[in-house]
Image (cartoon, grey):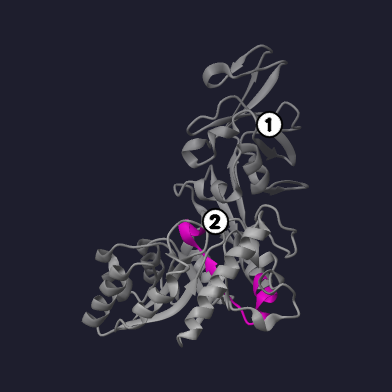
Amino acid sequence: MLTWVEVDLGAISYNLNQIKNRVEPYGAKVLAVIKDNAYGHGAVDIARTASKVPVHMLGVATVEEAIELRQAGIDLPILILCCILPEQVGEVVKHDITQTVCDLSVCEALSNAAARMNKQAKVHVKVDTGMGRIGIQQDEAPGFVESVSQITHLTIEGIFTHFASAERDIAFTELQFERFKHALSRLGEIGIRIPLRHAANSSAILGFPASYSGSASSLSSIPINMVRSGIMTYGCYPVGPPKEIDLKPALSLKTRVVYLKKVPAGRGISYGHKYTTDKPTIIASLPIGYGYGYSRRLSNIGEAIIRGTRAPLIGAMCMDQCLCDVTHVPGVSIGDEAVLIGKQENEEITADEVAKKAGTISYEIFCSISARLPRIYIGG
């Protein structure tokens, strides 16, 4: 095996338990978000680990993601966080999946499918309080929920919103939460109380519970009883907030040195000769590139750890290869492990560090790692 991903399932369990310890004393459950192949970590194995913790629910993006988990024997409740089309409702009901709704036509289609199968479809209503993506507008939410509540073979299990900038704009986050609370209050006035109510993403979990009540002493005013753990599940912090919960990174990206060569000073390296050696240089070829999801934006700025020493990546990133200056790495040999994300000896390259160099966020770094790379699971 030349290039692979290692995922520490023990770190996943640790992170989820840290989150549970933070929110469960205040009556909140945890939904682990494992959409997009669990942020590149491998959805089925992460779901199995989350089931053992356990969490209350799993969150995915598509019907296909949910069915993959059901076919793997995952029996935890699964919420599809995105919209579907009416023609997809049969699979949702058949596999006992909970669906996000903000459109009456989908609700009616779910009801019809459930009636045919002699089942009860479960839904969570999405309320748009300022994100601007899917969701019924907050002032329309009470009327929408009342209409949905009258549809047979349909159970409103949850209601939720999503914060647009919980990691940066506390004032707007508080405004969104007030809008959400107002919608819930209006529902209460017409006698509708929905069992699961959630708003907190990873950024908001870090501020829990004060983020929702003004102070930790007025907990009875918190109307939410579930949080959605996304990036924190995988050991990374959202941008901005203080790191108040201890987390362990779960993913490492590794490859091997497959070729070594000595080149003189003044030699152009890789496509376009965007790097020229300024001294006699030993170059290691690593079998990874943008075709594996290691971004071309890391050309000339990425690093690898080889024999416990950081070594710069030089030249343009290729589709399946990149080049590394190992002149200063003592004893470097063909077959040596090279770490692009993760720890080796006393050095560590974090996903956040890679993301900063690439001008993006850790979420994209994880999700970009190709499914063609084998995932090796440890610590489970």
The disc placed on residue 376 is: 2
User: Is residue 373 found left or right of 53 in the rendered image?
Assistant: left
- Label 1 sits on a secondary structure element that is strand
The residue identified by callout 1 is: 312
* Residue 30 image point, x, y percent: 58, 74
Q: Are marks 1 and 2 in contact (CB under 8 Å)?
A: no
User: Is residue 245 found left or right of 178 in the rendered image?
Assistant: right
Q: Residues within 10 Å of mark 1 (few under 14, many from 20)?
A: some
Q: Please name the amino acid that badge 2 sits on.
A: Ile
Asked if residue 274 lies in the magenta stretch, the reply is no
- Identified at 59% across, 42% down, the residue is 360
Q: Which of these two is toward me, 329 or 200? A: 200
- Identified at 71% across, 16% down, the residue is 280
- Identified at 52% across, 77% down, the residue is 184
The disc placed on residue 369 is: none
* Range drawn in magenta: 19-38
